């Protein structure tokens, strides 16, 4: 298939690889984006993961918490940052968050179809359409998630005026200011360092096997590393997997406020638990970042790519 400038641009934003490397990968995979990402990774030309957000769309994430037991986070997108800073838009996002806190909807379609809490004569979607008409920009209620603590509490953290919203659920038999402050610190960690799992117990064997395959391909494509004995190569792979897990598993990350620069989040939680006589455990977290995974049009950059590729 014909490889377009837009495809090259998208792959470049997803992987951080060079423009010509992206074009070559797309040509070799006949335009299959996932296969091209895989190829770039095996060749050591791409980062370990897709960029979290390509080019961020505008809008807000809003988190609401009730009685330390129930929390909800929503993302509502707008076309421009100007609207995202508008008080009317912010009030609407807050109302959507309150709706999410009360909802029993299992998915976004059901959420949009339910009665709007501020006016039961209309649906959430009706309220959204009205807001679009008033503000004059396309708005989207993109996603929501609700967290209910069964044996503990929930805390929240919002970063960048609503750019990132985080909920942390903990199992704990002690809920006091010190414990909640510690959990808020953990939420800040999640906002800053974007872990994918609470601990390595959540990482699937398939994920590990796939990463090992990628790492081995990278080593075999390296003229120096590929000449090393198989046992050494296996050790290198294990070492790199271990390093990656420390980056993507929350409890294994170095705590950003660690005084010694070494203490992990897991050890920090253990310390707080001991100081407060609590059985404290991080159960789960939710992290929303505005525009995550959405590509916003940038015609000038696309034209630049096209020019460089001779299209």
Image: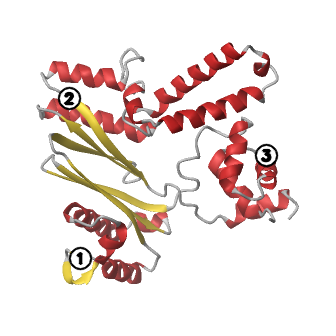
At a point 81% along the width and 51% down the height, the residue shown is 28
Disc ID at residue 116: 1
Q: Position of residue 44 (x, y in %)?
A: 72, 35
- The quadrant the C terminus occupies is bottom right
Q: Position of residue 243 (x, y in %)?
A: 53, 24
Depth check: give the residue in front, 182 or 284. 284
What is the tally of numbered marks visible in this picture? 3
At a point 36% along the width and 35% down the height, the residue shown is 198
Tell me: residue 191, above or below residue 265. Answer: below
Image color mode: secondary structure
In the picture, measured across the screen, residue 109 lies left or right of residue 204, that is: left
Q: Residues within 10 Å of mark 3 (few under 14, many from 20)?
A: some
Q: Residues within 10 Å of mark 1 (few under 14, many from 20)?
A: many
- The quadrant the N terminus occupies is bottom right
In the picture, measured across the screen, residue 246 lies left or right of residue 269, that is: right
Using the rendered image of the protein, determine whether residue 74 is visible from the camera's viewpoint: no
Q: What kind of element bears circle 3?
A: helix
Disc ID at residue 21: 3
Depth check: give the residue in front, 201 or 78. 201
Tell me: residue 287, above or below residue 202. Answer: below
Alpha carbons under labels 3 and 2: distance apart? 47 Å
Alpha carbons under labels 2 and 1: distance apart? 37 Å
């Amino acid at each position: 298939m014909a490889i377009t400038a837009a495809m090259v641009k998208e792959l470049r934003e997803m992987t951080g690889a060079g423009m010509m490397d992206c074009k070559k990968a797309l040509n070799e995979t006949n335009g299959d984006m996932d296969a091209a990402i895989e190829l770039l990774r095996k060749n050591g030309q791409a980062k370990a993961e897709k960029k979290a957000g390509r080019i961020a769309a505008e809008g807000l994430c809003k988190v609401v918490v009730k009685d330390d037991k129930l929390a909800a986070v929503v993302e509502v997108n707008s076309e421009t940052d100007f609207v995202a800073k508008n008080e009317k838009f912010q009030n609407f996002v807050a109302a959507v968050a309150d709706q999410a806190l009360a909802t029993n909807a299992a998915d976004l379609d059901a959420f949009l179809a339910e009665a709007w809490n501020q006016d039961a004569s209309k649906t959430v979607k009706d309220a959204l359409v009205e807001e679009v008409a008033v503000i004059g920009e396309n708005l989207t209620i993109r996603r929501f998630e609700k967290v209910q603590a069964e044996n503990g509490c929930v805390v929240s953290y919002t970063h960048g005026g609503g750019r990132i919203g985080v909920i942390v659920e903990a199992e704990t038999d002690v809920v006091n200011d010190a414990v909640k402050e510690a959990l808020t610190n953990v939420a800040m960690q999640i906002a800053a360092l974007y872990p994918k799992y609470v601990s390595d117990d959540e990482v699937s064997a398939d994920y590990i096997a796939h990463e090992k395959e990628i790492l081995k391909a990278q080593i075999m494509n390296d003229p120096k590393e590929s000449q090393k004995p198989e046992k050494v190569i296996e050790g290198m792979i294990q070492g790199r997997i271990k390093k990656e897990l420390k980056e993507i598993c929350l409890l294994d990350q170095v705590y950003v406020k660690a005084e010694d620069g070494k203490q992990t989040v897991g050890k920090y939680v253990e310390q707080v638990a001991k100081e407060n006589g609590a059985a404290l455990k991080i159960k789960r977290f939710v992290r929303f970042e505005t525009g995550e995974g959405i590509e916003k049009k940038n015609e000038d950059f696309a034209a630049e790519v096209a020019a460089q590729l001779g299209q």
